[in-house]
């Protein structure tokens, strides 16, 4: 059976060079994902619609980003789009531009692929004035480099390097009550099941996100603090060290779904229900 995941996330590092008050992850940690865990995950999963790369600050783990690119290029997994948000505070513009451009070639869809910079109020107010100026300069330099050196804007890929600056929707009320925002975040992080269907020996999971953490835990959902990822059994799907093949990961996701008490979509049953209505 092949495994097709609509949305997967790899947390490449828990290191960060900022200390935002709204951070749902919590205090940074000196942890970075191993190359072996990236390799194994991308060997076991056959297709990923959108692969989001997260942290911490992902650009502090450039070697891991290179490993993801390498595995997506030469390994088993086909990736449609990739997406990464950086705080942009201290990036190596040349290296990031080269990586982002190569990822675009490795991905086969690229409708939403891109790198976004955090320009929202919470990040901006955390930066000193000089740092905020540098963040803006880094953004501009990366955008120009991508545009003029790789010509990405000419190829209809939309805003490949873009701003993550939804200031209108970002208020204290919008914060999830996890990590540093635990005490003042107003939103709960809900638990969802994956929806699934099978065709031609492929099982497809959507609606929920499959998250690989930098210490190897696989959990459901991406808006969790490090503390929740490491300790909550109700979101746990497994650990990458214990999962050795695609069928095992499928079984682990299905076991998680059974915990959520949701019935997988069965096309035949669904058709019968619609007919009865
Ligand atoms: S929100 Fe992002 S940039 Fe800010 S502390 Fe958390 S991981 Fe770092």
Image (cartoon, rainbow, N blue to C red):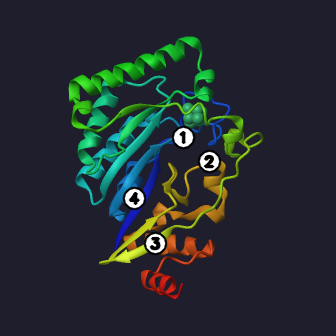
Q: Residue furthest right?
A: 183
Q: Quadrant of residue 221?
A: bottom right
**Residue 238 vs residue 197, the one in the foreground:** 197
* Foreground tag (4 vs 3): 3
Q: x, y percentage for residue 55?
A: 51, 41
Q: Is residue 242 left or right of residue 234?
A: left
Q: CA distance from mark 1 to mark 2?
A: 8 Å
Dot 3 and dot 2 residues touching (CB under 8 Å): no
Between the residue at mark 4 and the residue at mark 3, the CA separation in whole angstroms equals 19 Å
The residue under the point 43% across, 34% down is 116
Q: Residue at x 47, y 75 (%)?
A: 251
What is the distance, in whole Å, between disc 1 and disc 3 at their CAs?
31 Å
Query: Disc 1 vs disc 2: Cβ atoms closer than 8 Å?
Result: yes
Residue 240: horizontal and vertical position, in percent? 46, 61
* Residue found 62% across the figure and 35% down from its top: 170
Residue named by callout 3: 196
- C-alpha separation, residue under disc 4 versus residue under disc 2: 19 Å
Is tag 1's residue or tag 3's residue first in the polypeptide sequence?
Answer: 1
Asked whether the beta carbons under mark 1 and mark 3 sit within 8 Å of each other, the answer is no
Badge nearest the viewer, 1 or 3: 3
Under circle 2, the secondary element is helix
Q: CA distance from mark 1 to mark 4?
A: 18 Å
At horizontal 72% and vertical 42% (from top left) the residue drawn is 185
User: Which numbered disc flags the more N-terminal residue, 1 or 4?
Assistant: 1
Residue that label 2 marks: 226
CB contact under 8 Å: marks 1 and 4: no
């Amino acid at each position: 059976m092949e495994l097709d995941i609509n949305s997967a996330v790899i947390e490449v590092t828990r290191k960060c060079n900022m200390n935002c008050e709204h951070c749902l992850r919590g205090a940074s940690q000196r942890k970075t994902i191993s190359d072996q865990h990236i390799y194994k995950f991308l060997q076991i999963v056959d297709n990923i619609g959108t692969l989001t790369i997260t942290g911490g600050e992902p650009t502090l783990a450039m070697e891991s980003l290179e490993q993801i690119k390498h595995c997506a290029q030469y390994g088993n997994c086909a990736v449609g789009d990739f997406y990464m948000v950086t705080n942009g505070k201290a990036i190596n513009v040349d290296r990031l531009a080269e990586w982002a451009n190569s990822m675009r070639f490795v991905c086969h869809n690229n409708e939403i692929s891109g790198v976004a910079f955090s320009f929202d109020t919470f990040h901006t107010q955390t930066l000193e004035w000089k740092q905020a100026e540098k963040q803006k300069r880094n953004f501009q330099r990366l955008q120009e480099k991508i545009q003029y050196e790789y010509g990405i804007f000419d190829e209809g890929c939309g805003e490949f390097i873009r701003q993550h600056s939804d200031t209108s929707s970002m208020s204290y009320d919008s914060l999830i009550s996890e990590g540093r925002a635990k005490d003042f975040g107003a939103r709960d992080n809900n638990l969802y099941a994956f929806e699934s269907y099978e065709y031609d020996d492929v099982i497809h999971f959507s609606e929920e996100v499959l998250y690989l953490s930098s210490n190897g835990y696989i959990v459901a959902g991406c808006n969790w603090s490090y503390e929740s990822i490491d300790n909550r059994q109700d979101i746990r799907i497994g650990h990458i060290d214990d999962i050795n093949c695609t069928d095992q990961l499928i079984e682990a996701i299905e076991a998680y779904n059974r915990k959520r008490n949701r019935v997988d979509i069965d096309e035949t049953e669904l058709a019968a229900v619609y007919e009865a209505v």
